[in-house]
Amino acid sequence: MRGLLADAAVPESRGAASLHRFSPGSIRAALDAGWTADELLAALRGLSERPLPQPLEYLVGDVARRHGHVRVRPAGACLVLDEALSEEVLRTRTLRPLGLARLAPTVLTSPADPDTVLRALRTAGYFPVREDDTGALVVERRETRLAEPDPRPVARDVVTPEALATRLIAAGVGHQLPASPTAAVLGSLNPRLDRDELDLLADALDHRRDVRITYSDRNGTISHRVVTPEQVMHRWLVAWCHLRDDEREFTVENILDVAPPL
């Protein structure tokens, strides 16, 4: 009896004859503790030699009907996307560690923090953006770090155009000069591109110049775009897309060819 009254009623007086009061809050507390309405009514009837007061039965039934109408669950991040894309994201194997759950046709949640979710989505080939608590877009500022200059003087050979031409002729037609570090990185991400295309893309990336690419997205749709490359992040080329008039991330492996802008 003590456990029942402690869960479902509020004590108002103690002594030889204690007085307990039932309220919507006390009944809700009993339901929160695991009681069902039927169990609660049956236990109360077992304590009384008389039928339960009808208002008490109504109170238990009314609180039970409303109990659980609002549910609260922990969520580290919330994803807002269209219904078709939400189905695709839920079925993506590499995203299973995020523990994604559907709250609504266009809303998914994850217990992981937003940074972890963003990284996982980008690694899986998606292009998510971050929002703040009000739903406003958060612009991620990329910090550009310049290498510390070497205080030691560096001796450089001055090569005239005539001397360079002589070296190239002596090296033979089949000889290629070593690729720039940027071109080497791009080549490791996309072996499909030839040497000229890699050099052109690397030059555009190093000097923020426009370049024209043919690109295949993850659905196989091919488009031609003029872009201004900004940086390489993992396997993506971050560039300003003149077609969309916005910054975009392109999977380097999916760049089909590179050409000068028209």
Image (cartoon, rainbow, N blue to C red):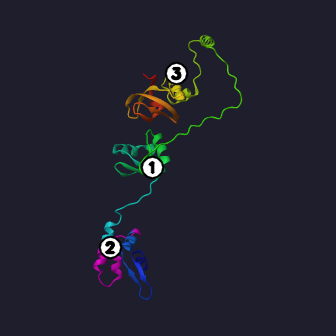
Q: Amino acid at mark 2?
A: Val
Task: Mark 2: give few (<14), some (14-19) or many (20+) Cα within 10 Å.
Answer: many
Earlier sequence position, callout 3 versus callout 2: 2
**Image location (x, y in percent) of residue 204:** 51, 26
Disc 1 designates what residue?
A: 132
Disc 3 designates what residue?
A: 195
Q: Amino acid at mark 3?
A: Arg
**In terms of image quadrants, where is residue 69?**
bottom left
Image: 31 above or below 13:
above
Earlier sequence position, callout 1 versus callout 3: 1
- Which quadrant would the C terminus be assigned to in this image? top left
CA gap, disc 3 and disc 2: 78 Å
CA gap, disc 1 and disc 2: 41 Å
Judging depth in this view, the residue of 150 and 257 nearest the camera is 150
Secondary structure of the residue carrying numbered label 2: helix
- What stretch of residues is rendered in magenta? 32-59
